[in-house]
Image (tube, rainbow, N blue to C red):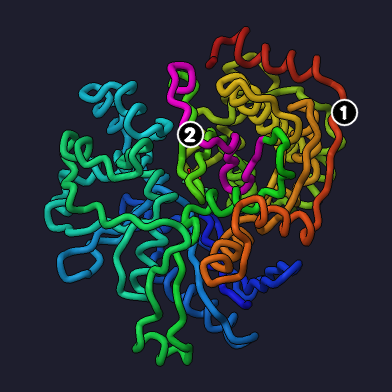
């Protein structure tokens, strides 16, 4: 069975052709395109029509390589488009890194206590949660004009099929979804001033979204293919493809623009400590809970390289990673999750300022800056993995790293060192694989459950293991230096 997996990350989008059969699972990239914020006026947007066009090009290419049986779309979370009553897009979707949400979260928390919000939605507090983005729009009048809010994969699915709906894994990232009942939190929406009519009917991953609209299919020389709802949140799809052995105590890091670090649970964990530690309970495929935290991720590295290039000092990634591997470890570490690293901008200067504030030497060479970023990421993984284990009373015996970060061997080794447990790295294309697996199951390819899907990933995809280097005391010292002595955060 040949399937197209559309996998949209915040910095690049790709369409992969997936092939699934007994004992067989392969994905091949057929189309890749850059993605990212487009600043127009004072707003940072997505080029959503450009994305739609690239998606169609990719599907066409995939079909030309061999007849497709289905299409699935996953993307980054939290962002959305608003449709009016005629189904037209009202305004261009805004990037979650735009500053329009500044202060909104704090304002909401003055009227709805964090405890209550967490009880209902189980979501971590991030300034760009859909709830806060929608509320930042109250003054522009669009919410009144809007009939429907569609998350990015649902919007693209709507343009392909004409069908409106909200796939649950991504709906669960809005902070408008009731984590216990699996319905929209309409009471909460009303209370904060978001019209509940905006929230479209929910659908499960594995349901059919619809079939390609006849005109669109004809225009692109495609059959009227089924579009299947997959785990439409990219992280949910990636977690499907974590090649964990049944019965093992595993944590995962879905490593890309963001690093999503956590555990898979059967039920949400909504305790006082989970709230204080700002862990999220996002919805997974097959009713699982993704109990995790957003760690700032490779974004900081990508943005650092972009800054250097913009200043006419381009640095090549592979070369600087090789040099960074030879740098002295843990000389300076920063709190990589600090809000200053969220918006686009000059990361090397922000890192230097953070080091100065915490009494550490600012890294000087490119390799030192990169080493500081990777050490700081690994330190955040250590803290998050350990905290997740404490909060759930579970052991973690192995950390699975999936996604683009698998290619960063230095980071994988530092992750094993920092966490003090083995890292199993792979697959790189976890989100596309998870996307393909859920489609394949929906279209009748067997694979009854997550264990079967993960078994197939394990049997077919290359994985690399990293053994911890045994320098726990050094990581503990760096952690204390940053978080205890300077008291930056707990
Ligand atoms: C990763 C991701 C993450 C979200 C963020 C907006 O791509 O979907 O899970 O928090 O983007």
Instruction: Please tell me whether residue 218 is drawn above or below residue 421 in the rendered image.
Output: below
Give the labeled residue for mark 2.
Answer: 267
Q: Which image quadrant: the C terminus?
A: top right
The picture places residue 187, in percent across and down from the top left corner, at 19, 37
Residue at left offset 25%, top offset 52%: 199
Q: In the drawing, does residue 104 fall left or right of residue 336?
A: left
| Sequence-wise first label, 2 or 1 | 2
The magenta stretch spans residue 359 = no
Q: Secondary structure under badge 2?
A: loop
Residue 379: quarter of image = top right
The picture places residue 307, in percent across and down from the top left corner, at 59, 47
Q: Secondary structure under badge 1?
A: loop
The answer to whether the residue bearing label 2 lies less than 8 angstroms from the nearest atom of ligand 1 is no
Q: How crowded is mark 2: few (under 14 residues within 10 Å), some or many (20 or more)?
A: some
The one of 395 and 425 positioned closer to us in this rendering: 395
> What label sits on residue 469 in the rendered view?
1
The answer to whether the residue bearing label 1 lies less than 8 angstroms from the nearest atom of ligand 1 is no
User: Does residue 180 appear anywhere in the picture?
Assistant: yes
Residue at left offset 57%, top offset 81%: 68
The one of 364 and 88 positioned closer to us in this rendering: 88
Residue at left offset 59%, top offset 10%: 486
Q: Residues within 10 Å of mark 1 (few under 14, many from 20)?
A: some
> What range of the chain is rendered magenta?
251-274
């Amino acid at each position: 069975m040949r399937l197209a997996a559309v996998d949209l990350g915040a910095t690049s989008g790709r369409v992969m052709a997936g092939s699934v059969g007994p004992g067989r699972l392969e994905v091949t990239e057929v189309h890749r395109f850059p993605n990212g914020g487009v600043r127009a006026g004072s707003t940072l947007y997505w080029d959503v029509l450009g994305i739609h066009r690239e998606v169609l090009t990719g599907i066409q290419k995939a079909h030309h390589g061999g007849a497709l049986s289905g299409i699935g779309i996953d993307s980054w979370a939290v962002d959305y488009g608003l449709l009016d009553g005629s189904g037209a897009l009202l305004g261009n979707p805004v990037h979650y890194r735009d500053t329009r949400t500044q202060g909104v979260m704090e304002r909401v928390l003055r009227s709805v206590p964090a405890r209550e919000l967490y009880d209902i939605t189980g979501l971590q507090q991030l300034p760009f949660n859909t709830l806060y983005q929608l509320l930042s729009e109250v003054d522009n009048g669009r919410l009144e004009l809007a009939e429907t809010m569609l998350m990015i994969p649902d919007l693209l699915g709507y343009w392909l099929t004409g069908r409106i709906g909200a796939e649950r894994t991504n709906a669960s990232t809005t902070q408008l979804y009731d984590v216990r009942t699996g319905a929209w939190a309409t009471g909460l929406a009303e209370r904060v001033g978001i019209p509940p009519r905006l929230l479209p009917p929910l659908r499960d991953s594995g349901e059919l979204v619809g079939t390609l609209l006849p005109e669109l299919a004809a225009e692109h020389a495609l059959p009227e293919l089924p579009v299947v709802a997959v785990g439409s949140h990219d992280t949910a799809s990636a977690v499907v493809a974590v090649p964990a052995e049944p019965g093992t105590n595993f944590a995962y890091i879905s490593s890309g623009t963001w690093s999503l670090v956590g555990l898979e649970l059967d039920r949400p964990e909504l305790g006082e400590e989970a709230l204080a530690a700002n862990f999220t309970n996002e919805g997974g495929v097959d009713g699982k809970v993704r109990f995790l935290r957003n760690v700032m991720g490779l974004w900081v590295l990508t943005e650092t390289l972009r800054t250097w290039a913009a200043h006419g000092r381009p640095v090549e990634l592979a070369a600087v990673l090789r040099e960074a591997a030879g740098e002295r470890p843990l000389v300076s570490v920063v709190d990589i999750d600090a809000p200053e690293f969220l918006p686009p901008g000059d990361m090397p200067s922000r890192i230097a300022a953070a080091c100065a504030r915490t009494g550490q030497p600012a890294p000087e060479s490119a390799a030192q800056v990169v080493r500081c970023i990777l050490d700081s990421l690994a330190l955040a993984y250590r803290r998050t993995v350990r905290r997740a284990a404490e909060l759930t009373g579970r052991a973690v015996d192995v950390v699975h790293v999936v996604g683009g970060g698998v290619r960063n061997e230095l980071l994988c080794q530092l992750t094993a060192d920092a966490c003090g447990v083995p890292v199993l790295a792979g697959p790189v294309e976890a989100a596309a694989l998870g996307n393909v697996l859920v489609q394949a199951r929906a279209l009748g390819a067997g694979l009854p459950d997550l264990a079967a899907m993960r078994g197939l990933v394990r049997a077919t995809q290359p994985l690399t293991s990293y053994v911890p280097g045994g320098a726990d005391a050094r990581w503990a010292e760096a952690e204390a230096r940053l978080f205890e002595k300077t008291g930056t955060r707990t």
